């Protein structure tokens, strides 16, 4: 992680999506902007966008001179060649000395959207429909979103989060969200929406009180206990049979002359 690089990225005039992608790469790079090889899936998860959007943003950053990408050149020495991620190098001169305009990068994105003119009508054909997830503009929100147990109304949650961090340290909010998510007395059906939780400042709440188990939960606990007892009985029976078989193998066979005398006695 390079805090200096991430600070330099924040100062750029890049569009939101490209800035978030470059921030994730800077988070994986050293102070020289090298040795960064996060996978596209990792970048997409941290930036809260789709993998397809990551690919378009990286291409725009490469064309704008902010980034150099070496395909399948990253990973450790023990990584298989067919599984190596791309390796990224951030152009420090471009990042700290050059500027780019939002309009230029928007033009690159439109070019990636495959809009072409037809020779007959001279009209633009319909662009491909690529899934574009809304970018997250507030740093730290995607960490909160990953931790929080109920993922609905993301836009409202983002607005509530932006309001909350103006008065409270984001680390305090994240710690409260983690406690709420891990609370054994939290029922999924009664879990608050993220926006409601944030607006009510529930990171200050005490642990939830011990709740009474529902009939379904009690039945499930009884079923699990019964299954555990059944498995223990099966293991004990199998162990007993193994010991019995071992004792039979070690037993001394009855002499033949003794068997003959025993038959005579039985006939009388």
Image (tube, rainbow, N blue to C red):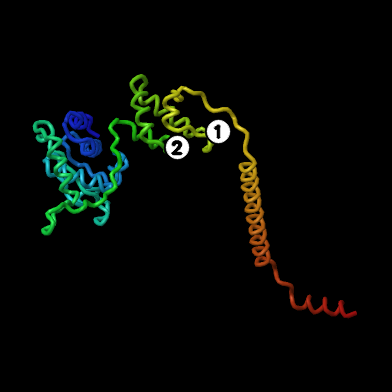
The residue beneath circle 2 is 150
The reply to whether discs 1 and 2 touch (Cβ–Cβ < 8 Å) is no
In depth, the one of 113 and 37 nearer the eye is 113
The kind of secondary structure element at disc 1 is loop
149 relative to 77, above or below: above
Closer to the camera in the image, 85 or 42: 42
Q: In what quadrant of the picture does the C terminus appear?
A: bottom right
Q: Secondary structure at mark 2?
A: loop
Percent of width and height locating residue 157: 38, 31
Question: Measuring 38% from the left and 37% from the top, which residue is drawn there?
Answer: 146
Examine the rendering and report whether any part of residue 24 can be seen: yes
Q: Is residue 160 left or right of residue 217?
A: left
- Quote the CA–CA distance across marks 1 and 2: 15 Å
Residue occupying image coordinates x 48% and y 34%: 182
The percent position of residue 245, horizontal first and vertical second, equals 66, 65
In the displayed structure, 159 sits above or below 215; it is above
For label 1, the crowd category at 10 Å Cα-Cα, with few meaning under 14, some 14 to 19 and many 20 or more, is some
Residue at x-position 24% and y-position 56%: 81
| 162 left or right of 207 in image | left
Give the farthest residue toward the front.
121
Residue 211 appears in which quarter of the rendering?
Answer: top right
Quarter of image, res 7? top left
Question: Which marked residue is nearer to the observer: mark 1 or mark 2?
Answer: 2
Image side of residue 180 versus residue 228, left or right: left
Is 246 left, or right, of 69 in this rendering? Answer: right
Residue of label 1: 185
Q: Is residue 29 in view?
A: no
Image position of 253 with respect to 121: above or below: below
Based on the displayed image, in which of its 4 quarters is residue 216 positioned? top right
Residue 201 on image: x %, y %: 44, 23
Q: Earlier in the sequence, mark 1 or mark 2?
A: 2
């Amino acid at each position: 992680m390079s805090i200096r690089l991430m600070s330099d990225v924040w100062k750029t005039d890049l569009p939101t999506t490209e800035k978030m992608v470059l921030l994730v790469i800077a988070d994986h790079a050293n102070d020289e902007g090298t040795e960064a090889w996060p996978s596209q899936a990792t970048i997409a998860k941290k930036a809260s966008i789709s993998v397809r959007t990551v690919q378009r943003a990286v291409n725009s950053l490469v064309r704008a001179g902010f980034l150099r990408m070496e395909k399948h050149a990253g990973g450790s020495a023990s990584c298989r060649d067919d599984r190596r991620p791309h390796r990224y190098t951030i152009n420090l001169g471009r990042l700290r000395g050059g500027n780019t305009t939002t309009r230029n990068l928007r033009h690159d994105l439109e070019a990636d959207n495959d809009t072409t003119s037809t020779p007959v009508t001279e009209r633009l054909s319909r662009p491909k429909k690529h899934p574009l997830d809304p970018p997250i503009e507030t740093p730290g929100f995607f960490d909160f979103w990953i931790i929080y147990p109920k993922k609905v109304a993301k836009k409202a949650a983002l607005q509530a989060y932006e309001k909350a961090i103006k008065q409270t340290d984001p680390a305090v909010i994240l710690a409260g969200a983690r406690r709420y998510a891990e609370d054994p007395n939290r029922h999924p059906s009664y879990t608050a929406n993220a926006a409601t939780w944030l607006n009510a400042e529930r990171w200050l709440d005490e642990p939830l009180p011990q709740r009474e188990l529902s009939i379904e939960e009690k039945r499930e606990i009884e079923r699990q206990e019964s299954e555990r007892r059944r498995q223990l009985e099966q293991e004990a029976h199998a162990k007993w049979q193994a010991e019995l078989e071992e004792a039979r193998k070690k037993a001394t066979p009855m002499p033949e002359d003794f068997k003959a005398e025993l038959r005579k006695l039985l006939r009388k």
